[in-house]
Image (cartoon, grey):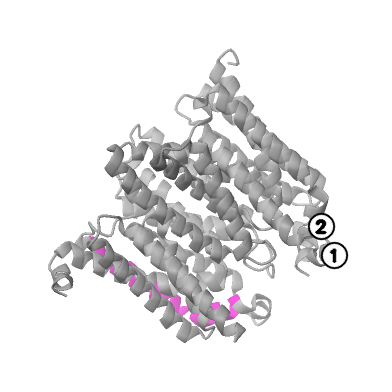
Amino acid sequence: MFAHAFVRNAYLAGTFIALACGVVGWLAVLRGQVFAGDALSHVAFVGAIAAAVLGLDVRIGLFALTVLLAAAMAVGGRRGQADDVVIGIAFAWVLGIGLLLLALLASSAGGGSGIAATNALFGSLYSLTAASSAVAAIVAAGVVLTILAAIRPLLLSTLDGEAALARGLPIRLLGTAFLVALAVVTAESTQAVGALLLIGLLAAPAGAAHRLTARPYRGLALSAGLAVGAVWAGLALSYAISWLPPSSAIIALAALSYLAAAGIPVIRRYPRASNASSS
Amino acid sequence: MADIVDLFQFPFMIHALEAGSIVAVLAGVSGWYVVLRRQVFAGHTLSVLAFPGATGAALIGLPASLGYYLACGAGALAMSRTRPSLGRGYGGETATIGTVQAVGLGLGYLFLSLNHAVLSGFETLLFGTFLGVSPHQVLVLGIVAAVTLSLLALIWRPLLFATLDPDVAASRGVPVRVLDTTFLLILALAVAATSQITGVLLVFALLVAPAASAQLITMRPLAGLVLSVLFALVIAWLGLGIAYFSIYPVGFYTTTLALGLYVLVRLGRWAAARR
């Protein structure tokens, strides 16, 4: 199966995107910001359309719009955290713009917009080129390294904002930086695999890890490991079963890991850790 | 002025206005609770579930709107089952909601590829259609809205108590968990109905923005509710009215009006606070 170039591309990009989604997703769940990632993934879709209308490279539209919205979320919320209501209204508006752009695109280029839209939503790992999978791997690895480099202040500012403030940590800046990292992962994953897969890899492995352990580093590793495992197994499954799209297989496996984790009688209860953050 | 009179000459505009008004009232009322309970993400996930609903229904040959309601109802149950222990607030457990959404989207995509066809009207599913509503659809919407609103009226007081102070409510014997589930089911109905008109992705223009603006102005339930419904109606009517005179889609105008309203109210609050 690895004799095929498209399989190797899929595994290369999929592994690193899964790593990034696992790490960023674990923090997003801890901070209660999965919705922000979800909203960013929908916005990325508009970025792709905007780039198509303006005749720019798709990647520019994706990154510009998601990072811009992430910054807006950080400004609109408190302490660099995003408020769900603000996210909801803002991203509905951006989608409204996307709708306008689709109308413009349809009237200028004479159709084809539906296909572009479907690709941005449900891009497939198995249709990546060698170049784009390499770029995806590099960007994802960069985000993971950046997050890991700043992991201690990020954890402290998430779990105990008062203590972080007392130590002089720039909470607002950290919150904004995290949202921007989330935006970069979103933009890259949307480009490579579609918005659909992103939310699955962001939420499910991280949720499972949070249910299994309250320890930060173990949780991060577990979340990343589950995400990578789901991608590897899902890709193999999809390769073996022709009617099964890779995204569906990967999401099914990730969701299964979450279900299993929720079903296991948990030894350390997760709420204890998060109660400390709200005090 | 003659143009505006003209607008009411067309049956399709009348149906659109009827459907828009029903949906606006429904979304304005249930949205007030969505914003109060901070269940925006849950609302969004429910609306996204319309996608597997529509594709699944197409696969087995059911009407799409039935698929909407079934999928949203199933999603509401899935989300409520996994809510953690009480007293954690409603912002938590985004992981569960996100997973439900991912599973829904994955299923939808699977159904779509099993069906070997690009879903007809894919953009309609995402972005809705005000124009092209049949009288039959208006009737169904009206019935769903009546059922949903009366259910909500029935549990109004205990739900308010359970929302504002879940721990005290639970200790007084209010069935908080049952209310949680009931509200999610009500929301599922409302969202499934709304998204048929506004489209899956633009539900928030009517569901969240009017209610959020109303709650910035007043926290009194009744006044806030009236304001929320009023805002939603204005957004729906103005959006439809403007779209009638332009070549661009309704969804763009409704979302822009929604954002404009919210920003205006926030600026007003900010100015009032500085004085």
The amino acid marked with disc number 2 is Leu
Residue A178 at what x, y percent from top left?
A: 69, 51
The residue lying at 61 percent from left, 44 percent from top is A184
Q: In the displayed image of the protein, which residue is found farthest to the right?
A: A167
Of mark 1 and mark 2, the one earlier in the sequence is: 2
Image position of A106 with respect to B144: above or below: above
Asked whether the beta carbons under mark 1 and mark 2 sit within 8 Å of each other, the answer is: yes
The amino acid marked with disc number 1 is Ala
Q: In 3D space, how far apart are the residues under numbered discs 1 and 2 (Cα atoms)?
A: 8 Å
B269 lies left or right of B111: right
Out of A32 and B231, give the one closest to the viewer. B231
> Mark 2, chain letter?
A
B215 lies left or right of A210: left
Out of A101 and A144, give the one closest to the viewer. A101
The residue lying at 52 percent from left, 37 percent from top is A59
Residue B157 at what x, y percent from top left?
A: 52, 83
The residue lying at 38 percent from left, 71 percent from top is B26
The residue identified by callout 2 is A156
Image position of A64 with respect to A11: above or below: below
Element type at marker 1? helix
Determine the image quadrant of residue A236.
Answer: top right
Q: Is residue B103 magenta?
A: no
The residue identified by callout 1 is A163
Q: Residues within 10 Å of mark 1 (few under 14, many from 20)?
A: few
Residue B24 at what x, y percent from top left?
A: 36, 70
Element type at marker 2? helix
Q: Which residues are magenta?
A: B137-163
